[in-house]
Image (cartoon, grey):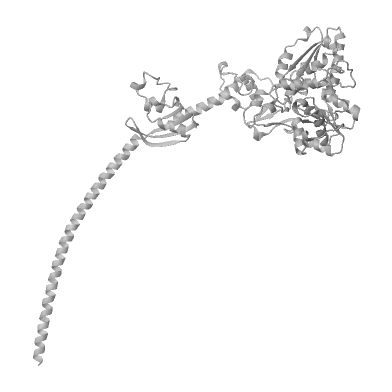
Amino acid sequence: MSNREYPLYTIKNNCQDCYKCVRRCPVKAIKIEDSSAMIVPDLCIACGTCYKVCPAKAKQPRNDLTRAQHLIASGKDVYVSLAPSWVAEFDGFSKEQLIAGIRRLGFRGVSETALGAEEVSANIARLLDEAGQTASPDANRLFISTACPAVVEYINKYLPEHSPCMTKLSSPLLAHCRLLKESLGRDIEIVFVGPCIAKKLEADRHPDLLSLSLSFTDLKNWFKAENIDLKDIHTSVFDKFIPDAAEEGRAYPVEGGMIETLKPYETGKKAYLMQITGINNIRRELSNIREQKLDRPVFIECLACEGGCIAGPCMTSKKSGFEKRIEVLKDANFDGDAGKRKPSVDISLDYAPDGVIECEYDETAIKNILAQIGKYSIEDEINCGGCGYDTCRNFARALLAGKAEPEMCVSHMKQQAQRKANALLRCIPSPIVIANARLSILEYNDKFVETFWNEEEHADIYDKNNLRGADLRDFIDFTNLFSASLDLEQDIHREHVRFNDKLFDVVVFNIDKKQIVGGIIEDVTTMEMKKEQIAEKAKEVIHKNLATVQQIACTLGEHMAETEVLLRSIAKDFAAEDNTQNNNSVTIRTNSNKRDY
């Protein structure tokens, strides 16, 4: 059977790894696959506990609403078997309004499942009467109700030794289906509407009687899709339960309601009548019962939901259980034929035990798997239940069976996380410290102690080997950075923070907003000193270079001046020589000219 074919399934993408369903499932019918909690149909009893407790709504009942709509569209005569707990769910609406609304959806009529409950009570009264008249010491004197299909599943799978004690009778729903087919025709289709998921199992196994099962939520969604508002409906004389209205059978949804319907019978006064609700309670009580101690017939009303069907997984009413109980009992009528009914239809049904076979693992295998999750001795088995199993050994068996994963062990994961954190703290060469909002030290590494421990100041106050809980302000004076990081909820980086003649680069980061802060403090004193030395040498070289340049400049300046003087002197000499030559040339030319005349 695939995941979505079973009455309950998991939406894997919604599963949040909380393991709440594992913790609350009374039969541990959950298998962890790829960190998702999947339902195991072979182990499940369809009680709906996982659906009720899942905070992420990853567990969902199978949606049969579309099938119901197709059934109506087929043109068949379809009737509703309405659970008596409707009075606690549809608050403020009369039965006539609810019937009218259902008929508008296309159903031919509405009948009360409580009619089947009354038939069951009449048959149980007969069984108890016959048992009371049997003197044989070997005769069965313990009778367990079969009204709740989740209980039937549980006993057949997990308490198969008590399967013979279950009454060989149909549930009230299947008994009602038989009554309706007897009175309305064998070809009709019947759809149950109520608060129970396990009823889907009955529909799957008895399709000849019950076509399918819907929840109250399904019905409300159908009303909404068809724009049917019950408060605006005008009712008519045709809006009534068929074939008749139920009476005392309406008390069945509450814890002890079934017992109340048996008390009016004479045989009910000659038998022990008691009720148990909740699978864990049923396990505890039935596991310790000793039938040979019974001196008269004992009938036990067993319901999977604590408080009865009014606490069913598909009940959405926010009223208290007390209010729901009162409303149901007010609607029941014990003044009619209660205690006077005779069985009118054959509702016998055999139940075959189908015990779940659990693998047995030897001690060596269990110890080996426990060691993988850090449980090396009895003292390590803290049995915290965080994984969903009540003991570490049961968790180990689940691991061996492939139903669980090591990551489900909270203490193991915490230890692993601590070891990883410690390894990181050890390996990082810089001082590291983690503190809370009060600046009390939560974690630190050896480098922090080595750097900031002052024997004279700290030895009388703290233990050098354990500084957890110490005030961080006693070790460093720049805790204002830590406080600022907490207040601003952001990381802070400061360079060259001076403390005790040293320089530090400080990075402060948030781990848990306004709660926990961490700091990495890097000693950069040596590095900065080297930088300063390099800077001084650079300055010295620069000064020398400048001096050399200046000296060169001065020398060049002197040479340039001397050169300029020399050049000017040479230029003057050349100029003077040129003038003398020019003058001589003119005189000669003049004299020469005179001789021509």
Tell me if residue 283 comes above or below residue 214 in the rendering: above
Answer with left or right where residue 128 lies relative to residue 154: right
What is the quadrant of residue 452 in the picture? top left
What is the quadrant of residue 123 in the picture? top right
Does residue 202 show up?
A: yes
Residue at 83% across, 7% down: 137
Say which of 396 and 566 sits in front.
566
Residue at 76% across, 15% down: 275
* x, y percent for residue 398: 65, 23
* x, y percent for residue 236: 85, 33
Point out the image quarter for the C terminus.
Answer: bottom left
What is the quadrant of residue 169 in the picture? top right
* x, y percent for residue 119: 86, 20
Tell me if residue 113 comes above or below residue 101 in the rendering: above
* x, y percent for residue 391: 62, 19
Does residue 305 show up?
A: no
Point out the image quarter for the N terminus.
Answer: top right
Q: Residue furthest bottom?
A: 597
Answer with left or right where residue 80 lies relative to residue 464: right
